[in-house]
Structure formats: structure tokens, C-alpha cells
């Protein structure tokens, strides 16, 4: 079994489902008392969030690159073969995934690639995206889906993007679950479907805490679960 290096804490509430889902997936595959070989480095999200909103992405990338180097070193101390790959437990910070990749020699399992594979398996080509404002508005994520995988991405309008972003940072990242916010998310999802979205990406790892498949008239792609499943598959491959 390959060793998985997790970079989490962005936020820690959404890192917990990663840990649970990966271990549950390994247990389903291998049975008995099997669990995943995991090394976890959890950052202080307060520091990352301040850098995000200040537009200081290079500095945030340096923090995650240091985390990646620490993971590789820790895994090498724990497992003779070392960590085999890294999973960055967040969508937004994939904006600086290049800094992580350049800091280590092991692969990084990109969340957008795993999500795209799930969308393509479902036979869909046009999806709506709910995420942080950074992920919805910038090209690092949407562009990878569109140019790299041929998937058209629809995003909510400006007011809706602001609401989605606020709920993520002011509620979900603090563990607050609001029925009012859930209803607003449902309305936005419905409007995306009416615009032609064949599916909806829950493109922030906290969104699955608030809404599920039951809240959407079209298939949803929860990136936390998709990424965790992809990590299990990669860890057990071969």
C-alpha cells in the first residue's frame, strides 16, 4: 500500500472527512482491520486565509511547499519507501500547487483532475461550480477543467458568488451549519441547472457539510469525496 501525504487544515473541518473517507475506502477494499498509511501535516488556516484575501498567493504557496517537504521527510522516517504521493485537502489552494510540486519529487494528486474524471465517467460536459470566490472567478481551476478536460464550467452571478464565498468563510469554516444558507445554496444550484448545468461541482471541501445530492435537481460532484476516493485508488493501485 502506498503512503498518502495529506496537507490539511484548510479548514480542519473539511480535513476530517478526508481522513475518514480514505480509511473507510481502504477498509472496504481490503477488509479486516486494514486502514490507510497516512502522514498528515495540518496548517493554521488563519495564516492562509489572511494571505488569500490579501492576494499574497506566493507566500501562501511557500507555506504549503514547506508542508510538502515536511511530509516527505516524515513519511521517509516512518515508511522505508517514503511517501508515494501528496493530497492537498482543499480546492482553493490548488492555485499554488506548482509550489508544492516543485518542492518534492513525489506526485501531487490534483483535485480538479480527479473531479474531471468523475464528471467524464458520468458522461457530462457542462457543469455548475460552487466554490470560494477565488476558485469560481480565477482560471487555475476552471481553466484546468475547460482546457485540460473539455468540460464547460458555469458559475453563479456576482451577488451569488459573494454569498457562497461568505458562507464558506464565515460559517462552514467555523463549523456553523445554517438552514437559511442551505436554502440559498439550493436556490443557486437550481438556477445553475436552469441555465443548462448538467451537474454541480461542490468545489470547496466544506460545501458538502451544508448541501448534498438531495439539494440538487442534477448530479453533484462532492470534491472532498471524489478526491479521497481517488487517493484510495492510487494508494492501492498495483
Image (cartoon, rainbow, N blue to C red):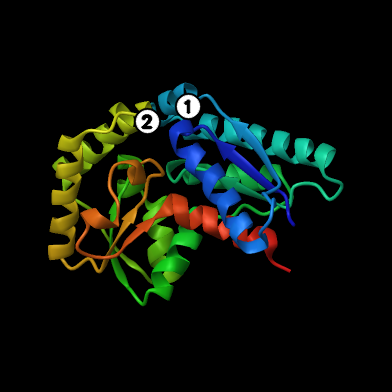
Q: What residue is drawn where x is 47% and y is 68%? A: 117
Instruction: Provide the secondary structure element on which disc 1 rests.
Output: helix
The image shows residue 54, relative to residue 7, as above or below, that is: above
- Crowding around mark 2 (Cα neighbors within 10 Å: few <14, some 14 to 19, many 20+) is many
**Along the horizontal axis of the image, is 209 left or right of 23?**
left
Q: Which residue is mark 2?
A: 173
Image quarter where the N terminus lies is bottom right
Whole-Å distance between the Cαs marked 1 and 2?
9 Å
Q: Which residue is mark 1?
A: 45
Instruction: Provide the secondary structure element on which disc 2 rests.
Output: helix
- Crowding around mark 1 (Cα neighbors within 10 Å: few <14, some 14 to 19, many 20+) is some
**Along the horizontal axis of the image, is 45 left or right of 189?**
right
Q: Nearer the viewer, residue 90 or 100?
A: 90
Q: What residue is drawn where x is 77% and y is 35%? A: 74
**Along the horizontal axis of the image, is 192 left or right of 170?**
left
Counting from the top left corner in percent of width and height, residue 218 is at 23, 65
Q: Are marks 1 and 2 in contact (CB under 8 Å)?
A: yes
The image shows residue 47, relative to residue 168, as above or below, that is: above
Quadrant hosting residue 88: top right
Quadrant hosting residue 159: top left
Quadrant hosting residue 147: bottom left
Counting from the top left corner in percent of width and height, residue 212 is at 30, 52
Q: Which residue is outermost to the front?
A: 32
Counting from the top left corner in percent of width and height, residue 185 is at 20, 46
Q: Earlier in the sequence, mark 1 or mark 2?
A: 1
Q: What residue is drawn where x is 72% and y is 49%? A: 3
Image quarter where the C terminus lies is bottom right
**Along the horizontal axis of the image, is 213 left or right of 140?**
left
Amino acid at each position: 500500500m502506498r503512503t498518502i501525504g495529506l496537507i490539511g487544515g484548510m479548514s480542519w473541518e473539511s480535513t476530517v472527512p478526508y481522513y475518514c473517507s480514505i480509511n473507510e475506502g481502504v477498509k472496504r477494499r481490503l477488509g479486516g482491520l486494514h486502514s490507510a498509511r497516512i502522514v498528515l501535516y495540518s496548517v493554521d488556516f488563519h495564516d492562509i486565509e489572511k494571505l488569500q484575501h490579501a492576494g499574497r498567493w506566493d507566500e501562501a504557496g511557500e507555506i504549503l511547499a514547506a508542508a510538502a517537504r515536511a511530509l516527505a521527510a516524515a513519511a521517509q522516517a516512518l515508511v522505508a519507501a517514503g511517501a508515494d504521493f501528496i493530497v492537498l485537502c482543499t480546492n482553493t489552494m490548488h492555485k499554488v500547487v506548482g509550489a508544492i510540486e516543485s518542492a518534492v519529487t513525489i506526485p501531487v494528486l490534483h483535485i480538479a483532475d480527479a473531479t474531471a474524471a468523475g464528471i467524464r465517467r458520468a458522461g457530462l460536459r457542462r457543469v455548475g461550480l460552487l466554490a470560494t470566490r477565488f476558485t469560481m472567478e480565477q482560471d487555475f481551476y476552471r481553466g484546468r477543467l475547460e482546457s485540460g478536460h473539455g468540460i464547460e464550467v458555469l458559475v453563479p452571478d456576482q451577488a451569488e458568488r459573494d454569498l457562497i464565498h461568505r458562507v464558506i468563510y464565515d460559517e462552514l469554516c467555523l463549523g456553523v451549519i445554517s438552514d437559511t444558507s442551505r436554502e440559498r445554496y439550493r436556490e443557486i444550484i437550481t438556477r445553475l441547472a436552469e441555465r443548462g448545468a448538467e451537474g454541480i461541482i461542490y468545489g470547496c471541501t466544506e460545501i458538502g457539510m451544508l448541501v448534498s445530492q438531495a439539494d440538487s435537481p442534477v448530479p453533484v460532484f462532492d470534491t472532498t469525496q471524489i478526491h479521497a476516493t481517488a487517493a484510495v485508488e492510487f494508494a492501492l493501485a498495483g
